[in-house]
Amino acid sequence: MIEQRMNIGRMEEVINVFGSFDENIRLMESELRVSVTNRDGELKIAGEAEDVLLAQKALGALLALSARGEPINEQNVRYVIDLARAGQEEKAVELVQDVVCITAKGRPAKAKTIGQREYVDSIQKNTVTIGVGPAGTGKTYLAVAAAVKAFREKTIDRIILTRPAVEAGERLGFLPGDLQSKVDPYLRPLYDALFDMLGAETYNKYLERGNIEVAPLAYMRGRTLDHSFIILDEAQNTSREQMKMFLTRMGFGSKVVITGDITQIDLPGDKISGLKDAVRVLRGVEGVGICTLTEQDVVRHVMVQRIIKAYEDYEKRRSGGRKERK
């Protein structure tokens, strides 16, 4: 057992790092098997040498974030600990960046991980960005935030959100209502993100004016979309032909973001995913950015990270077993 001491700056930063009822520091103590106390203007860290070193690195990064006005919570404590374990704790300060967009309720929408930051940067720099990653990594949410920002800055005239209406076990014809009512359930995640950014009243106003369009992918055929921010969500469920059709809809002054999770493909087994195909075909093409997000970029409940990791490990074991049998 060893003990290390860290000098602290402003007490407000330490209070932010410790969290309400010291919940953040208790989490760090549990994750890294150390004891952290705040006495006489110093942080004292006790534990095994390797654990204490990791805690020092993580605390230093969290204090640096706090000094830049970043609120410290469970999500970024866990993320900074992961960065420290990977020897990348200095990257934590990169998370303090300009807000992508302010939501209707006044909350800032911004990247919360290094992977998300690279994704947002790619959207800003490239004409076409492909974001691939598991659920909870903010692919759709950040793309919608970037679209709303571009619309507010008047760099584009329309926001167009689309996704393939892949039937999961039941036919569209069995669903009640007209065609729009039948496809609305498939588009609900896009509505939710827009409502959060704009508020229901503003969303409906822009919808009526034609500034916002939310439609299934089939509606895109035969169109040319100028001065638009176009988001294709759930792209893993497109066919090769659908993906090519979508990509060739882009007109002058437009920007395209394609998002999907290649571990959740609902296509028939004999069909190749248009998203997987596009990643292979478009890699290295000028003006196209390809971003891969991982379970480390999940910003939902910690259990989502654990579930994704468990499925990845299981698939690796299965594929390894098949190779051995061959």
Image (cartoon, grey):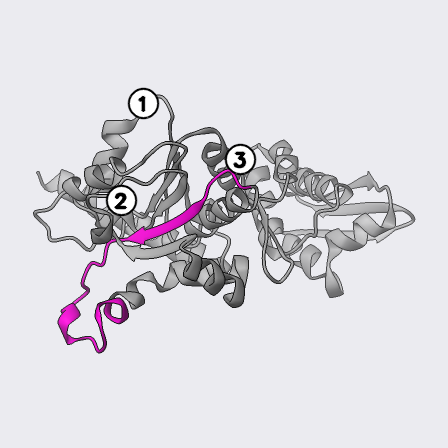
- Front-most of 47 and 127? 127
Looking at the figure, which quarter contains the C terminus?
A: top left
Looking at the figure, which quarter contains the N terminus?
A: top right
**Start and end of the magenta stretch?**
154-182
Name of the residue lying farthest toward the bottom: 176
Q: Which mark is residue 86?
A: 3
Q: Residue at x 46, y 32 (%)?
A: 122
- Front-most of 110 and 175? 175
Mark whose residue sits in front, 2 or 1: 1
Coordinates of residue 211 in the picture (x, y in percent):
43, 52
Residue located beneath label 2 in the image: 316
Residue 238 horizontal side relative to residue 271, left or right: right
Coordinates of residue 166 in the picture (x, y in percent):
20, 58
Q: Is residue 170 visible?
A: no
Element type at mark 3: loop
Q: CA distance from mark 1 to mark 3?
A: 31 Å
- Reading the chain from its start, which is encountered first: label 2 or label 1? 1
Q: Is residue 20 magenta?
A: no
Q: Quadrant of residue 304?
A: bottom left
Element type at mark 2: helix
Q: CA distance from mark 2 to mark 3?
A: 21 Å
Coordinates of residue 298 in the picture (x, y in percent):
47, 51
Q: Amino acid at mark 2?
A: Lys
Coordinates of residue 35 in the picture (x, y in percent):
72, 53
Q: Residue at x 60, y 43 (%)?
A: 80
Name of the residue lying farthest toward the right: 40
- Front-most of 21 and 2? 21
Residue located beneath label 1 in the image: 285
